Every structure is written in C-alpha cells, then in structure tokens.
Amino acid sequence: MTRTLSFAKTTVALAAVALMLTQCANKKNNQDGAQFDSSLTKGKLPIAYVNVDTLLANYQFAKDANEELVKGQEDSRLKINSRAKQLQEDMATFESKMKNNAFLSRERAEQENNRLVAQQKELQELNQQLSNALLTKQQKFNEQLRDTVNKFLKGYAPAHHYQVVLSTNAMNDNVLYAADGYDITKEVLQQLNTRYTKKK
C-alpha cells in the first residue's frame, strides 16, 4: 500500500505574487479621481512592468522559501513511505499467518486485523496532516512575498514617478508589448535582494 503525498507544486503557488503586482499603482491618484497628467505622454509614460518569473527565479527570499518547502515535502514523503512500507510488511505477515492457520484463535486473528485497519487509518490521517501543514506553510510564504513586494513598490514607484506597475509571466502575460525601458525587473530584483541580504 504505497502512498505518496499529493502536494501542490511550490514554485507555481509562489507565482501568485503576480496577482498583486498590478495593484501597486499610486493609490493617492485613485482617491483623488486619478487625474492623468497629459504632459507625461510627451516622454516616457508613468508605467512599468515586472517579470514575475524572473523575480521568483532570482529573488533570494523566494529561492530560500522554495528550498524550505521542497525539503519539507521530501521529509514528509519519507515519513509516509516508511510507515507505508512497515504496514505492507505487517499485512503480508498477517496474510501469511491466515493462510497457514498460524493464529492460536479466531479472536487473535481479529485483533491483528483490527490493528492493521487502525494503522492504515492513522497513515491516511498523517498524510492529510502533513499535506495541510505544508499547504499552510506555503500560503504563509506567499503572503510574506506579496507583502514584501507590495511594500517595496509603494516606495519605489512614486520615487521613480510610476503611476502603474504591471506584471508579466509565462502563464498570464498582461503585457503584450512594451518598448525598452519599461521593464524594471532587474532594478527591482537587485534592490529586493539587497534588502533581504541585510535582514538575514
């Protein structure tokens, strides 16, 4: 009865940060009626975008979080597989004893059968507990990542005169075309990594 954990892919789940990058426009402009300064169209528009795939692949916090989640998944799978292997062996022994009429009494055979059924149920419950624990941890990392990027862009965007920051990635590309100079991924990534390194 080999069972493995059904965990969601950690790196894919972390990409949920793409959903929040588009809300990092200047909120004050929204509150005041979002009046657009037409003079800005004479030069570079106050818009930029961040490539989320690149951010997740190179932001050290995301890399560390993914590594921790993968390690947790591997540890949980090892624990489940070890328990499942032992249960398989016990079940094989039980079947062998039943086949060879090795139990001293019917009651003894029923006791052993009930023990194996209980162990199987415990294994299923453990599998679910470990899956839920990993999912909770994954959600916590997603929230930390979203909050970190949000907080950074709230300071970065106004300082660089951006009114809108979009996101782009392979799964959900919100930017069909952008001229050179609108991709701020590299600079955002450098500053995020610098801040993260200082906090470690």
Image: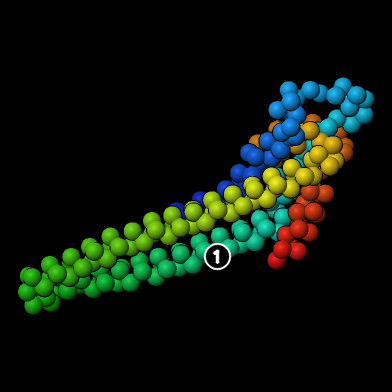
Q: Please name the residue shown 33% across and 63% down the image.
A: 123
Q: Please name the residue shown 54% across and 51% down the image.
A: 139
Residue located beneath label 1 in the image: 71
Q: Give the x, y percent position of residue 138.
A: 54, 54
Q: Please name the residue shown 89% across and 31% down the image.
A: 44
Q: Please name the residue shown 74% across and 48% down the image.
A: 152
Label 1 neighbourhood size at 10 Å, few (<14), some (14-19), many (20+)?
A: few
Residue nearest the viewer, comparing 200 with 173: 200
Answer left or right for 19 relative to 164: left
Q: Give the x, y percent position of residue 113.
A: 18, 66
Residue nearest the viewer, comparing 47 with 5: 47
Q: Quadrant of residue 105?
A: bottom left
Whether residue 173 is visible: no
Answer left or right for 89 relative to 112: right
Q: Is residue 32 above or below residue 73?
A: above
Question: Tag 1's secondary structure?
Answer: helix
User: Where's the C terminus, which quadrant?
Assistant: bottom right
Q: Give the x, y percent position of residue 73.
A: 50, 61
